[in-house]
Image (spheres, rainbow, N blue to C red):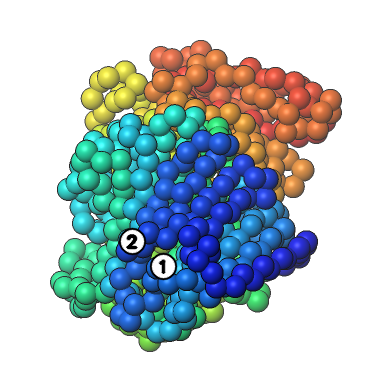
């Protein structure tokens, strides 16, 4: 990694009553300001952004022994200025500016670290002695009338079966837990703030509880499991300890993060979580190759080809392998069902000849992922043997499913299994898991983390709407890679757009919105292992469309938010090498006539723009789209048709 470390300045202050009173902090450009103030039973960190009040957070720790006592005067306060550049293994940018001001407040048994970027505030504790953390308080308070966009779950089981709630904070129900990220519009600020966490290790993930009538959201954490028992597909705690985690001396806590956006588009290409996460732990990353994958499960393993019967069999995956080779798709995914016993991965009989599939795929330069239920890997010796076996067979990656928890034990399970996969040079996709907290920077073989209400819900629920799809760009997508699994080839206006009931079809599932809406996801969504979710034969029928989307990169060298309005539309531009892509997605209330600002291109240079978009015919048939080429100069506005629930993708090549 190439670092450009510009300046570090440390200021050591003697113990004095004035220090205990408050510590003032500011970001490099001064637009974000924060103040630390000790209070009875804890401390408060308040913030302003562009001169507007962005709320405050009251913090405290309950631990044994007690490590955080803000009433004691600090032993020292140190400030540090940093101006680095981070080279990424992969991401939405190949190089990231990492400029911040950081304050470390040292107490006898712990330190509080507060870091300010120009658009984000993050704080974390660091314990100096071993300690059992009973509870952590982080009460985020905002002006009365502030709005929340929150995702509810029951307890701490990560099932993404509900819909997001858009309501005043004071009207959120107290019966749910709300998972991070959580989007807030503080009243009178004209801005937004995203609440989430980063660099979570040996600690539970951040969730929230609401108190009706109050504009305060309180952090809520799952206690450490006492024992685990099989329930459904997962291992579920039947009882829990009275603590969150046990910390060693000099161990750091996760970051608590507030990401500020003066304009909605500022959230679309944010790298804050990456910057706050641990650097890459792998010496060799040359084997890590993100890319597109053809997926079998969403279409029910079906093939519309007389030569192949479809289903979970070797013949199906020979077809998928050959399909991937024809369209230069780097991977195929073999989902649940290839083994007959999901809990005995070393001895189970199989429904396919995995070695023959891997060999055929390899000849066509295609890699193979296989699905595994997470609880089968709970024993590390079993996991080691299984991963070693897959590596010897030439398998490229694993899709590990159904952890469904974010307690401290689960978070370490994600890390340990991902590290073990890296030892065996296996990529890993996590399903049935929380949203990303940046672990993919430490282990870049972790290419996707589901943590999202994604396309698979169209086989189960009628309410996966275009507005939901757009709003993910301001919430879940900000945290890091997800696994939405786009690519639906059966598209409908039923549901949110025309008000007619959306019919769930498990045999041949469809999605709300237009075909171009699905295509836009290949640029808009941050998914290094992006899928073609539908049947391979469905794509074969539309070769022009399939060729276009299969050529879209899944990782990028540069990304820019162009324009956006939460709940309505969003557009970004991304560069891979010398080629720029721009894309946009519309919600049910989105823009029909969209003008794309092309200032991201070299001004005045000549480009050929290849445009996949909605067209006039789309208004009566959402599966209709236009694919055309036109000449354009860099900086010249480009008018594009975009239906409600629609989208577009433009590829720019210099001519």
Q: How many marks?
A: 2
Q: Residue at x 65, y 45 (%)?
A: 30
Q: Where is the C terminus found, in terms of image quarters?
A: top right
Residue 631, labelled with which disc? none
Figure check: 479 above or below 512: below
Give the residue at mark 2: 40
Mark 2–mark 1 contact, CB under 8 Å? no
Q: Residues within 10 Å of mark 1 (few under 14, many from 20)?
A: many
Q: Nearer the viewer, residue 205 or 5?
A: 5
Query: What residue would you read off at disc 1?
Result: 70
- Label 2 secondary element: loop
Residue at image position (73%, 40%) is 579
For marks 2 and 1, the one nearer the N-term is 2
The part of the image, by quadrant, that contains residue 582 is: top right
Front position in the image: 330 or 222:
222
Viewer-side residue, 447 vs 221: 221
Q: Residue furthest bottom?
A: 381
Left/right of residue 640 with respect to residue 586 in the rendered view: right
Judge by depth and name the residue closer to the eye, 615 or 207: 207
What residue is drawn where x is 58% and y is 68%?
A: 77
| The N terminus lies in quadrant | bottom right
Q: Is residue 574 above or below residue 57?
A: above
Left or right of 460? Residue 60 is right
Residue 244: percent from left, percent from top: 30, 71
Q: Residue at x 64, y 57 (%)?
A: 101
Q: Secondary structure at mark 1?
A: loop
Residue 82 visible, this orientation: yes
The percent position of residue 472, horizontal first and vertical second, equals 43, 40
Q: Is residue 463 above or below residue 310?
A: above
């Amino acid at each position: 990694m190439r670092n450009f470390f510009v300046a570090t300045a440390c200021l050591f202050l003697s113990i004095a009553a004035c220090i205990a009173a408050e510590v003032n902090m500011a970001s490099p450009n001064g637009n974000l300001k924060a103040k630390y103030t000790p209070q009875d039973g804890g401390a408060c960190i308040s913030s302003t952004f562009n001169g507007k009040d962005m709320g405050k957070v009251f913090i405290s720790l309950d631990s044994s022994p007690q490590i955080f006592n803000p009433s004691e005067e600090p032993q020292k306060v140190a400030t540090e200025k940093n101006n680095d550049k981070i080279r990424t293994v992969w991401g939405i940018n190949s190089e990231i500016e990492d400029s911040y001001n950081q304050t470390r407040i040292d107490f006898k048994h712990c330190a509080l670290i507060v870091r300010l970027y120009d658009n984000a505030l993050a704080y974390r504790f660091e314990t100096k002695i071993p300690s059992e953390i009973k509870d952590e308080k982080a009460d985020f308070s905002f002006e009365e009338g502030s709005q929340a966009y929150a995702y509810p779950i029951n307890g701490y089981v990560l099932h993404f079966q509900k819909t997001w709630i858009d309501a005043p904070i004071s009207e959120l129900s107290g019966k749910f837990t709300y998972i991070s990220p959580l989007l807030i519009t503080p009243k009178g600020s004209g801005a937004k703030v995203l609440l989430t966490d980063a660099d979570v290790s040996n600690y539970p993930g951040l969730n929230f509880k609401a108190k009706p009538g109050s504009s305060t959201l309180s952090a809520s954490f799952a206690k450490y499991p006492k024992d685990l028992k099989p329930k459904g597909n997962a291992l579920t705690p039947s009882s829990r300890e009275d603590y969150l985690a046990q910390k060693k001396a000099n161990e750091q806590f996760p970051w608590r993060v507030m990401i500020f956006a003066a304009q909605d588009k500022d959230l679309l290409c944010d790298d804050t979580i990456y910057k706050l996460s641990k650097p890459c732990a792998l010496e060799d990353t040359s084997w890590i190759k993100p890319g597109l994958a053809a997926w079998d499960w969403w279409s029910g393993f079906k093939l519309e080809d007389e030569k192949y019967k479809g289903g979970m069999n070797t013949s199906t995956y020979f077809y998928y392998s050959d399909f991937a080779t024809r369209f230069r798709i780097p991977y195929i995914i073999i989902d649940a069902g290839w083994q007959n016993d999901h809990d005995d991965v070393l001895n189970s009989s199989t429904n396919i000849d995995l070695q023959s599939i891997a060999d055929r795929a390899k000849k066509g330069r295609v890699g193979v992922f296989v699905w595994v239920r997470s609880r089968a890997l709970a024993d590390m010796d079993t996991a080691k043997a299984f991963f070693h076996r897959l590596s010897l067979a030439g398998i490229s990656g694993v899709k590990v499913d159904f952890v469904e928890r974010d307690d401290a034990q689960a978070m370490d399970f994600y890390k340990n299994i991902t590290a073990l996969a890296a030892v065996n040079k296996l990529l890993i996709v996590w399903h049935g898991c929380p949203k990303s907290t940046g672990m993919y920077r430490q282990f870049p073989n972790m290419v996707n983390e589901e943590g999202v209400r994604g396309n698979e819900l169209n086989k189960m629920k009628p309410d996966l709407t275009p507005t939901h799809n757009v709003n993910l760009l301001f919430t879940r997508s900000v945290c890091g890679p997800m696994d939405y699994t786009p690519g639906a080839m059966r598209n409908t206006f039923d549901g949110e757009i025309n008000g007619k009931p959306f019919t769930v079809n498990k045999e041949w599932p469809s999605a709300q919105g237009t075909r171009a809406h699905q295509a836009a996801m290949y640029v808009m969504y941050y998914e290094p292992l992006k899928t073609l979710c539908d049947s391979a034969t469905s794509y074969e029928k539309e070769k022009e469309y399939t060729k276009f989307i299969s050529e879209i990169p899944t990782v990028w060298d540069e990304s820019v938010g162009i324009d956006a309005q939460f709940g309505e539309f969003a557009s970004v531009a991304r560069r891979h090498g010398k080629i720029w892509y721009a894309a946009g997605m519309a919600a049910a209330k989105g823009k029909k006539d969209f003008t794309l600002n092309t200032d991201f291109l070299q001004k005045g240079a000549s480009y050929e723009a290849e445009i996949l978009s909605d067209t006039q015919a789309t208004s009566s048939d959402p599966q209709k789209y236009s694919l055309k080429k036109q000449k354009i100069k860099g900086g010249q506005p480009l008018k594009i048709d975009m239906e409600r629930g629609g989208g577009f993708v433009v590829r720019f090549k210099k001519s």
